[in-house]
Image (spheres, grey):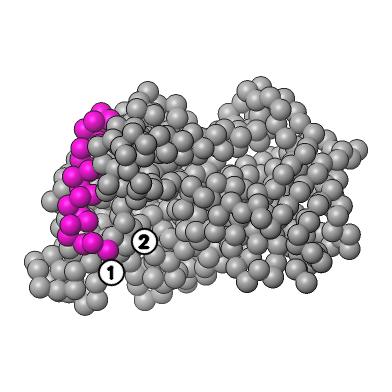
Amino acid sequence: MSTKAKFILDKDYVISKIDNRIYGSFIENLGRCIYGGIYDPTDPTADKDGFRQDVIDVVKELNVPMVRLPGGNFVATYMWEDGVGPRDQRPRKPDLAWKCIETNQIGTNEYMDWVNRIGAEAMMTVNVGTRGILDALNLLDYCNREKGTYYSDLRVSHGYKQPHNIKTWAIGNELDGVWQVGQKTPFEHARIARETAKAMKRQDGRIEVVVAGSAGQEYPTFGEWEQTLIQEAHPFIDYLSLHQYYLNVEKDTANFLAKTLAFDDYIKSIGSLIDYMKVKNKSNKDIHISLDEWNVWYHTRRDDMATIRDRGEEWPIAPHLLEEPYNFEDALVAGAMLIALLRNSDRVKIAAYAQLVNVLAPIMTEENGKLWKNTIFYPIYYTSKYGRGTAIQGIIESPKYDSRDFTDVPMLDAVAVLSEDERELVVFAINKSMQDNLTVQCDFRSFGDLRMIEHVALENNDVYALNTLASPNAVLPVQKEVSKDCTEIVLSSLSWNMLRFSIN
Ligand code: AHR
């Protein structure tokens, strides 16, 4: 069966120029993300620095502009000094977040080598949970000052003559979480964040600062956390960090797909809080959102967390952890989260899917072996490649459905992007209907004479279909026949789509 929807677009319905950093990602010393993922000197493709070249090649396909590192929860007990200097002298330390041993074979300089290798910039997270302002300043000096101080000269002595010039610094991570070593109350966090940001900006006036928001809407001090933070630290915050992972433990596809409505609300409500605080603080300083951990995460969550909890005295190095086997419906949700990021690109200037390799990741590796792409790779790939330019808000008229937690969920979820050179209009669209194809009547008004040049779709009869090492191509995007008629486009039931039109 087919139902009908309407999608109206006008050049004047501009949301915002898109900040390409919304296609950023995240790497953490967690499981096999770093060791066995990006770095494995024993791998046949390893380059002179031990980085897996096959991983670099596929990461480059994703065109990642910014990488957040090295945590995440890992940063809670991290001492950056352990990860610099001669490798054979670097200490092994317990990592309390993931209950593993950190070998420190990859640290600040190697992160930067790798980030440069993939053509990205870094967002460096500093530990303010168990460390303090001075440690953050020392790391900043190590990274950004050319020479002439103890820490900048130390970097030079480690073989890095040029400073790393890291522009974006993240203060803390999920510090309201009971799982954090160094958990804070809203006020404690607000004060340390304020003083750290103030001091770091005094030391290097070129940097910008992202400050940790609450770990999520479900935590007790959510809202109060952000309000207190902005109350105390408004002049020093450039971006407020938000995190969001979606779960489908109930195996309720319709409800799972509807959860991205809550994602929109989450971003909008934090946007309203920021606006309110501008009024309250009599400030015209804008604070944008850095959604620097987003994804689907539930397949491995319970078991892996139990494994970590029950591990006893065993402290492994880079074990298999959080290696989420993403299925087809997870890819639809990831695609919908990207659509929501574009729809909120006036607020969200930085984002990071968490994570990049092996851990909650689009890219998976076998030890000394092959690499494969998880299902979520594809919407990320296409949105990152073609979702650059100006985001355009569409008006959607769509049939709706009710699910367990949501009412009036539009079957059609869509947003458009006018390319940077203004020669292409790109529509990202999802049909959430489990039964019906959707015939979308497109009214693209002021865009004039359009010609469809590509229609890529991710569709599958089985929501649980997934790609594995043995079967890496079970879920792949397909090239659909391009329709000559740009006014009526059919989206298959349960599908993610990218439609490209040339503007003549
Ligand atoms: O991405 C995995 C973990 O999720 C991160 O370390 C933490 O910040 C979040 O809870």
Q: Which mark is residue 122?
A: 2
- x 29%, y 32%: residue: 228
Q: Find out whether residue 181 is within the magenta segment.
A: no
Q: Find out whether residue 198 is within the magenta segment.
A: yes
Residue 224 x, y percent position in the rendering:
34, 27
Q: Amino acid at mark 2?
A: Ala
**Which span of residues is magenta-colored?**
183-206
Above or below residue 62? Residue 415 is above
- x 24%, y 46%: residue: 127
Residue 209 x, y percent position in the rendering:
31, 52
Residue 180 x, y percent position in the rendering:
29, 34
Q: Which residue is mark 1?
A: 164
Sequence-earlier tag: 1 or 2: 2
Q: Is residue 3 left or right of residue 310?
A: right
Element under disc 2: strand
- Report the quarter where the C terminus lies: bottom right
Question: Mark 1 packing: few (<14 Cα in 10 Å), some, or many (20+)?
Answer: many
Judged by its main secondary structure, the magenta piece is helix
Residue 178 x, y percent position in the rendering:
31, 28
Q: Amino acid at mark 1?
A: His
- x 58%, y 62%: residue: 388
Q: Is residue 24 left or right of residue 405?
A: left
Q: CA distance from mark 1 to mark 2?
A: 9 Å
Q: How many marks?
A: 2
Q: Is residue 124 left or right of residue 248?
A: left
Residue most toward the right? 1
